[in-house]
Image: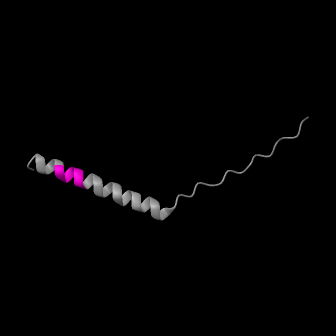
Amino acid sequence: MSKKKRRRQKPTAQPKRIEVVAGDILAGTISGLITAAILKLLKW
């Protein structure tokens, strides 16, 4: 019987929290601005 190869441990995915939060804020701001522009065009 051949020896089982030990599985290499994958580095755990740890996103840089600050970048993630900044991305979320940016995405929220952009979507908010788009929504506001559409509402303005529809004269709501």
Residue situated in front as seen by the camera: 3 or 16? 16
Q: Relative to 9, is 40 on the left or the right?
A: left
Name which residue lies at 12% across and 51% down: 40
Q: Is residue 25 magenta?
A: no
Left or right position of 9 against 28: right
Residue 34 position in % (x across, y down): 23, 50
Question: For the point 42% across and 62% down, which residue is it?
Answer: 21
Q: In this view, does 17 lie to the left or right of 29?
A: right
- Which quadrant: the N terminus? top right
**Where residue 42 appears, x then y in whole percent?**
10, 46
Q: Where is residue 24 in the image (x, y as percent from the top left)?
A: 38, 57
Chief secondary structure of the magenta span?
helix
Q: In this view, does 18 lie to the left or right of 30?
A: right
* Residue 34 part of the magenta-drawn span: yes
Applied colour scheme: one colour
Q: Please give the count of numbered marks on the rendered protein.
A: 0
Q: Which residues are drawn in magenta?
A: 33-37
**Front-most of 38 and 2?**
38
Residue reaching furthest left? 43
Q: Residue at x 14, y 49 (%)?
A: 39
Give the residue furthest to the bottom: 18
Indicate the quadrant where residue 29 lies: bottom left
Of all residues, the one furthest to the top in this rendering is 1
